[in-house]
Image (cartoon, rainbow, N blue to C red):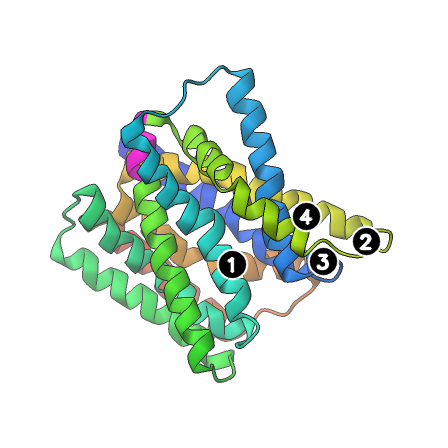
Amino acid sequence: MDKRTAGWGSGLLGVIIFSGSLPATRVAVRDFSPMFLTSARAGLAAVLGAIFLFALRQPLPKRKEILPLVIVAVGCVVGFPLLTALALQHITAAHSIVFIGMLPLATAIFGVVRGGERPHAPFWVFSIIGASAVAGFALYGSGGGTLIGDLLMVAAILVCGLGYAEGATLSRRLGGWQVISWALILSLPIIGILTLITWPETLSNVTIPGWISLAYVSIFSMMVGFIFWYRGLALGGIAGVGQLQLLQPFFGFLLAAIFLGEPIAWTMIISTVIVVACVAGAKRFA
């Protein structure tokens, strides 16, 4: 298997892991507030990352690597979860997918700016069509948004796309799991304060599914998924592999249908076929 193919495979596995966040979060917010869930998942993942770094005796990042790590922390660990949690207080989850569909395009743009990549012109055509398909699917079944909610989602997409591109570039030197581990540790001061502020009055009412969901979004969504994702971006290319994110909403809905019994709309099937074709086209011309 060549490096590029391995990168796409690793990226796809990362997207599938991230897709489990949607149904897991839906279960977890029944027992935890969105803000506490956002901070607690990052805090638990940071502890896990620190244990790995210490146990495997990883060297400290070099001075020139601190700023990129801070960008990853601000974009992926703190910024995106926090901004989306705030946005979802003003818009519906379905409406937020309109913006999630823009994330691969944002990642590709930052891959050009920060990663020095130069995809061919047809790549951008497939990328825009794929993003439009996801946005159109979401708009079909979503309610209207609000100005503040939409602006928060735009900010979330921009900081996350930058964090993905920066982390992928940095993982070529440090390694994928090292990048997310150090980024999590750098975010601990903010995450720790948010966790203390939003700590629930009691945890006695938390159900077993709630604890399992918290464990999933902490270990897999915040740690394991990033290991495969950053490896995929580093090996297969930020712009190209980033297009796999177009599949994330549909994987999420599929998992929600399997584990939560939610229905699958016909529009989802049509949109998925279009998105798969666009991802394949983007792969060819990336």
Three-letter amino acid code at the position of disc 2: Val
The 10 Å Cα crowd at callout 1, few under 14, some 14 to 19, many 20 or more, is: some
Asked if marks 4 and 3 touch (Cβ < 8 Å), the reply is yes
Q: Position of residue 191 (x, y in %)?
A: 56, 47
What segment carries the magenta color?
168-173
| Residue ID for mark 3 | 32
The secondary element bearing badge 4 is classed as helix
Foreground: disc 1 or disc 4: 1
Instruction: Check whether the beta carbons of the residues at disc 4 and disc 2 lie within 8 A of each other.
Output: no
Quarter of the image that includes the N terminus: top left
Q: Earlier in the sequence, mark 3 or mark 1?
A: 3
Amino acid type of the residue tagged 3 in the rendering = Phe
Task: Judge whether residue 170 is colored magenta.
Answer: yes
Q: Which residue is mark 1?
A: 82
Label 3 to label 1: alpha-carbon separation: 15 Å
Location of residue 135 with respect to 40 vertically, above or below: below
